[in-house]
Amino acid sequence: MFKIETFIETGTFKGINAELHSKNFKEVYTCEKIEEYYKKSFERLNQYPNVKIFKMDSAEFLKKWRKMNLCKYKCNKKYVMMYCDAHFFNPKDPPKKGKFQILKELKKLKNMDNVIIIIHDFKNGLGGITYDGIDLNFELLKKDLLNVNPNFVFYTNELGSCSPVTLNYKDITNSGLHLDEETINNLEYAWKEPKLTYRGILYCLPKEVKIDGLRKI
């Protein structure tokens, strides 16, 4: 629909998502600041020439990416997709300040109206992030999102659009993923407890769309 060629991810973790999307997009940019996860991700992603991984804070990564590439996309009126997933892995032990990294990220995208933003772990009744009693919800994000693009139209997923993962190993291999230990562990967890893997997602789009399973906010 939007002819997107570029996928930008914050929070590489172990690189499984970036590896999958190396097959779906012309170019993939991703960042991970934790040394352990960066090393694992680099080993996984180094074989894909269209994937670039950066070891740095996600907000600074977006600032750097925007400075280097804004004209390339803005001038050509191309949309890019931002997948924001740089949440703290252990919500029971968040930092004292700056718990919601997404708020820092959105400030780096101010007035960038050629971006489509997808926020994972959004609190919408499905699995989502809560720090110190504060939910990662629309109320928290709305102001900064409208500063990115005041014309954003917002959608979220619903339980009815979620279904248990039923793919077999052959299907997964055909999708482009490698069945190493990390990938298998993730898949087996999803197959064993599918309801625990249903996560809330917020979609921030530049115009209205009709997609089954999405509810307009």
Image (cartoon, rainbow, N blue to C red):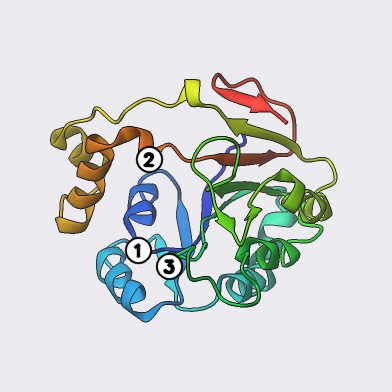
Instruction: Using the rendered view, name the quadrant where residue 66 is placed.
Output: bottom right
Left of 28 or right of it: where is 100? right
**In the foreground, 138 or 67:** 138
**Disc 2 marks which residue?**
197
Give the position of the N terminus as an image quadrant.
top right
Mark 2 or 1, which is nearer the eye?
2
Q: Local crowd at mark 3 within 10 Å, few (<14), some, or many (≥20)?
A: some
Mark 3 residue type: Lys
Residue at the image point whose x is 24% and y is 27% from the top? 166
Left of 61 or right of it: where is 63? right
Secondary element under disc 3, as helix, strand or loop, is: strand
Q: Local crowd at mark 1 within 10 Å, few (<14), some, or many (≥20)?
A: few
Report the label total: 3
Residue at the image point whose x is 49% and y is 62% from the top? 91
**In the foreground, 74 or 9:** 9
**Disc 1 marks which residue?**
49
Mark yes or no: residue 16 visible: yes
Which x, y percent locates residue 170?
14, 34
- Above or below residue 114? Residue 191 is above
Give the position of the C terminus as an image quadrant.
top right
| Residue contact between numbered discs 3 and 1, judged by CB atoms under 8 Å | no
Secondary element under disc 2, as helix, strand or loop, is: helix
Instruction: Using the rendered view, name the quadrant where residue 43 is placed.
Output: bottom left
Which x, y percent locates residue 145?
76, 51
Left of 110 or right of it: where is 31? left
Residue at the image point whose x is 24% and y is 48% from the top? 177
- Above or below residue 31? Residue 135 is above
Residue at the image point whose x is 41% and y is 43% from the top? 24
**Disc 3 marks which residue?**
52
